[in-house]
Amino acid sequence: MNQLNRRDFLKGSSALMTLASFGLFGMDFKDREGPLKVALIGTGWYGKSDLFRLIQVADVEVVALCDVDKNMLTAAGELVSQRQKSKNVPELFEDYRELLKKHKCDLVLIGSPDHWHALQAIEALKSGAHVYLQKPISVDVIEGEAILAAARKYNRKCQIGTQRKSTPHLIDAKKQIIDTGKLGKISHAEVCCYFHMRANGNPPVEPVPDFFNYEMWTGPAPMRPYDGLPHIRWWRTFMEYGNGITGDMCVHMLDTVRWMLKLGWPSQITSTGGIFVQKEGKSNISDTQTAIFEFPELNVVWQHRTWGNPVDPEYPWSFKIYGEKGMLAGSTMQADYFPYDQKEEKIHFDCVFEREQYPEDLTEDRIELNAAPATRLHMKDWLESIDKDTLPIADVEEGHISTAACILANISMELGGRPLRYDPKTRTVIDDPEATAKLRRPYRGPWVHPEPDKV
């Protein structure tokens, strides 16, 4: 199939999937009366983006929103009222526990910073809601085990926001290249991110504004001196709240490779790196890091630099899967098959956009137009899994493996680059008590770290 025909095919298949799913979801909840009741915890940029994609593809009523920033929360309430059919402004909460206590929700979306994911997801699952949880699912490995245990204990469907699995051009690339064996034996993969996305300023300490509950925002994390609103990327530049570029960006591409190649837990993880170049600011996440995730006869190698040029300008945040017959490169924007046999034709896969079907996308602030179709398909898959009582494509267990692997890479780097072998059955790093102790971060009181056996 030539490039033009493939592009037309992708656009057509995307439209068919969209139309088919609309018909399907008209029947999915046929035993219900009225729309599904939805709440969003964390009303920042991506939380709202996820919620708006859900509103586009399902009959829902957003009944509640939660955020510790009153200004952001009020603005989100107004935006949601403009987007949902009822035009109602959801009830607004500062404390997610009060929201979950008052509203019996069918679906809860969580778009809060990473250090809040575990406590909020577990409480939402315990409340009876199905959960859409942004990646990475946790800031430490045992948190992830606890979320997984809660999802299974309460029999709720927990979809993780690793939506590359629902990205139309990557789905097609997997079917056409990986599943047909075009690459031959696959024995190496590379994942990378060379975006200059590491916030590295030196803002002064200042009084906390009255509209922002910094105590509640910090929650179980260490309390840093307040030096401005942590929204957008400022909080991500600190290990107190996340796992750096590896936890933020590697989790997507590692998860994509694992999905395409049907990989489980890495047998061993090794990582080195640190702050080698950008030493002038407050940021304490690595600006340079390499990690090796070992699988049987296959290494997946991660590299990020938040400085300098990308190795391949066409694929600055991407995966590359190498087989004996060719290589498949993929990103959020495109994919390419490069056969080693020069007689064989290269195959290009274009990103699918849905501007015509969803014109409201074009006026949404900070929307990632390339990711919107993937998120819509991801939401549909989640709803279908609830309806059919099957696991969603980005089930919490898969999200946990990809998240934990990235966390273990950071632990390896912190311990001088020694290899780590995690055993999910015992929830320990084999023969390494020091590394095992780092699987569970200390919590700031009065918050209590969740345990898998006590959810």
Image (cartoon, grey):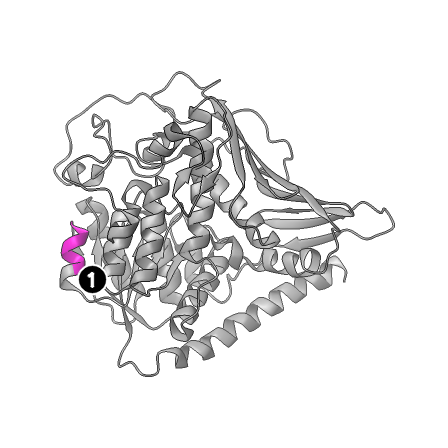
How would you rate the neighbour count of disc 1 (Cα within 10 Å): few for under 14, some for 14-19, many for 20 or more?
A: many
- Is residue 274 at all visible to an observer of this figure? yes
The image shows residue 416 at horizontal and vertical percentages of: 47, 21
Q: Residue at x 34, y 61 (%)?
A: 152
Residue found at the very far front of the displayed protein: 431
For residue 128, what is the image quadrant?
bottom left
Query: What stretch of residues is rendered in magenta?
Result: 94-100
Q: Nearer the viewer, residue 289 or 364?
A: 289
- Going 50% across and 26% down the picture, which residue do you hit? 418
Left or right placement of residue 141 versus residue 217 in this view: right
Q: In the displayed structure, would residue 137 be above or below residue 225?
A: below
Above or below: residue 224 compared with residue 96: above
Residue 124 spot, x, y in % from top left: 25, 58
Q: Nearer the viewer, residue 87 or 70?
A: 70
Query: In x, y percent, where is residue 206?
Result: 18, 25
Give the position of the C terminus as an image quadrant.
bottom left
Secondary structure of the magenta portion, mostly? Answer: helix
Q: Could you say which quadrant of the image residue 236 lies in? A: top left
Can you see residue 160? no
- State the quadrant of the N terminus: bottom right
Label 1 secondary element: loop
Residue 82 percent across, percent down from the top left: 28, 63
Reply yes or no: does residue 98 show up in magenta. Answer: yes
Q: Residue at x 33, y 59 (%)?
A: 151
Q: Quickly name the residue at label 1.
A: 90
- Asked if the stretch drawn in magenta spans residue 112, the answer is no
* Three-letter amino acid code at the position of disc 1: Pro
Q: Is residue 132 left or right of residue 222?
A: right
